[in-house]
Amino acid sequence: MVQPSPYTPGAVARETPGRSRQLAEISERLDMMSATGRLVSRIRVDHGPRGVGKTSLLRQVEQRAHARDAATIWVTAGESAGLVPAIADGAERLVRRWPVKLRERVATALSHLELKVTGGVPGVASIEAAWGKTGGRRARGATREFEDLLVATVEVAQERQFSGLVLLIDEIQAAEPASLRTISYAWQHFQSERRFLPVALFAAGLPESVSVINAAVSNSERFAYRQLKDLPPDAAAVALANPARELGVGWSADAIDAAVRYAAGYPHTVQLIGENAWRHAGFPNPGATIRREHVELAAADVEEDIRELFTARLSKVTRQVELEMVLAMARLGDGPVRRHDIAAAMGKPTDALGVPRGRLIGAGIITDSSHGYLEFTVPGFAAFVREVHDLDDPQG
């Protein structure tokens, strides 16, 4: 029997080892909403670079919401003409198979939102069209209509024996400012007027999500930001061992240690090394063991994948000042580096880093590691840059 690999590089993972703190915080909020019928008063945004498992975490939130009998609406920002129209479409789809009387209540709220945004053209598609043409400018006065839509959706969901409504937004950094403002002001009103409305909003996005939201709204205290970082060694080991164990396959201790060291905490690399080790172990049957030699063979394959990823990332650096910043960071080492040191290496004042920093974060190349520090998003990228540009190793 050939067992397919249980590892999922580039796809949504079934489990999220190393995210227990985040999930515990989220579960507490969901418990409060479902048990007391109260509003989750702050919009939570988990953010981090690509490959750290943001979407997988959000899918775990969705599962936990379902386990608490909550209805959910999942949208991906940037996929339609606007985030608010996408949520409206999600509400319409949620109630589509429910009794007519319940659907009509949501339809009435939708029609009021349509009237406000489009000037009277019916249908969710018309909201998307009008929103797209105007960048949401017509919706500046549509916050109340959007609130009414959420209230109607929650109320009919409760009549269907759901405990509440959970909105889930992926790639929130791609949302347009008008939708972010509408959502933010809706939550501000709910906090003072609808404390016993069981609705919550959880989002995930790239590191620039924080600056995108803060630039769009004046009441950013409505949002709770949480940074997702790389996995600690014990969590990476769990991410490797558990999927194999479910299929009756073990890892030798030295194989796990070697794989964890190679992945350096980056979740995407953890999945890559797991998948390739599984393949080199011959798609093992129950009772088999993945050994160190399988990991060593896998590492050579993963190295090719990672180099392709690095090459693609580096190709996004098209402006000279951005390249100078990348080279300066690579010269300074492999871990987090101070902005002050980067600026000094470039011969520029620290405040001159703002624009290139923002672009490099947007390209997924660097991220803020802590206050005043930056680092590359993928372990090993600094060494790759030094190799490509023939720079000296800072370790000598």
Image (cartoon, rainbow, N blue to C red):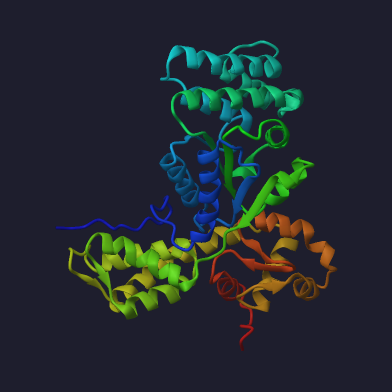
Q: Against 119, is 18 above or below?
A: below
- Residue drawn at 57 percent across, 20 percent down: 125
Q: From the viewer's side, name the closer residue of 72 and 241.
A: 72
- Residue drawn at 61 percent across, 43 percent down: 172
Q: Position of residue 237 (x, y in %)?
A: 39, 70
Q: Quadrant of the N terminus?
A: bottom left
Q: Quadrant of the C terminus?
A: bottom right
- Residue drawn at 75 percent across, 72 percent down: 342
- Residue drawn at 43 percent across, 53 percent down: 10
Q: Against 203, is 92 above or below?
A: above
Q: Position of residue 177 (x, y in %)?
A: 72, 37
Q: Position of residue 6 (x, y in %)?
A: 31, 57
Q: From the viewer's side, name the closer residue of 347 and 132.
A: 132
Q: Is residue 110 visible?
A: yes
- Left or right, 164 with reference to 81: left
- Left or right, 176 with reference to 308: right
- Left or right, 386 with reference to 307: right
Q: Against 358, is 389 above or below?
A: below
Q: Against 216, is 119 above or below?
A: above
**Location of residue 49 by image quarter:** bottom right
Q: From the viewer's side, name the closer residue of 110 and 385.
A: 110
**In the image, farthest residue toward the front:** 36
Q: Position of residue 394 (x, y in %)?
A: 64, 83
- Left or right, 206 with reference to 267: right
